[in-house]
Amino acid sequence: MCLQGTYLSDYYLRVAKSLQIMEPKKPADIYKSQFETVISSSSSSKDYISSTYVNAFVNAGFKEDSMVLTKDKNSNQSVISSKGKSSVSITAALGMVLMWSDSETSAEIILEYLSSENNTIKAGALLALGLNSVGLRQESDLTKALAGDYLEETSVSDSSENQVKRAGLLSLGIAYAKTGDREVTEILTKFLHPEKRSIRTISFAALSLGLVHLGSGNAEVISILLDVLREMRPQDLTHTYTRFIILGLALTAMCRRDVVIFDSKSPNEEDAPTDITSTYINVTDLGDPVKMQAKVLVGACSMAGSGEVLE
């Protein structure tokens, strides 16, 4: 039960109660006094979303706050809807406030937003599911069940409907980070076909796959992500979202000094494989700028926390 995080929320709230910090905090309590008049106004979407982030972090895991989870549910959704594209982040913040809650508690609240006709709110609700489930392993696997419902076949277009699907992909990555879950891996792998998917959908699936296999050095996952980069269309190699595919690859090497980049065309002798016990990521046949970005990101992630000053 300790490994499943069954009582994580209960103990967290028990400690908070003993410290007498259960009352929801307001963003205004955090801001420095000279900025209060500037940021207290919710007229601007940027002002509102910045306050939402502060609210989410300061009330993380407390199951209640002073902004999003108020008693007037209809008013909550109408306010969020009025914030346009920012609605995704604002709704996702629910997941931090509800972090580690049991399935029944989180489902009752998040399902209301998932049933919204506004796709940006729906996408945010899926992200909230992932954030809510971080570190938890429950019999009623709400995230996998609900996110899976939205991950049916999708076209290569970047419609708002596919935005919901991409949020579902990222939700799984967040919820199952570093678990190596086989079922989630299979779900994500289906979205890694350049000829069938948009670059945005592929990038979200790749990033989530990297999160699920964080620091695993899993040779199979590394091979899958390398194949995705090799099969990409020339015009996608310089696309902004391609970096997230590379980041997904790098995340598998996090804190793993035995995962090494290999480039047979490199003039640097140190890039040649020498240790048979290491896992090598062969970037020889990757095009630029992907190859250089992979070298930097994989190298940085593999040496993370090592204290290697020269690196």
Image: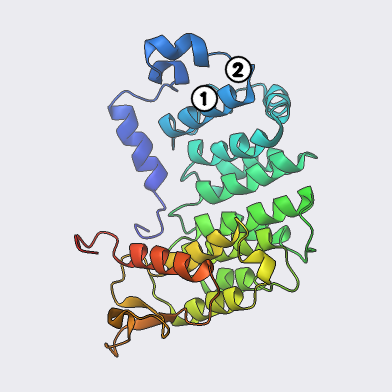
- State the quadrant of the C terminus: bottom left
Q: Position of residue 158 (x, y in %)?
A: 76, 54
| Side of 294 where 301 appears, left or right | left
Mark identifier at residue 51? 1
Q: Position of residue 246 (x, y in %)?
A: 51, 65
The three-letter amino acid code for the residue at tag 2 is Ser
In the depicted structure, whether residue 235 falls above or below residue 93: below
User: Residue shown at 40%/54% (left/top)?
Assistant: 5
| Side of 206 where 148 appears, left or right | right
User: Residue shown at 50%/29% (left/top)?
Assistant: 64
Mark identifier at residue 118? none
User: Residue shown at 34%/77% (left/top)?
Assistant: 260
For the view shown, which residue lies furthest in the front direction? 267
In the depicted structure, whether residue 260 falls above or below residue 99: below
The three-letter amino acid code for the residue at tag 1 is Ser
User: Judging from the image, what secondary structure is the residue with disc 2 in?
Assistant: loop
User: Judging from the image, what secondary structure is the residue with disc 1 in?
Assistant: helix
Task: Please identify the quarter of the rendering in which residue 141 is found.
Answer: bottom right
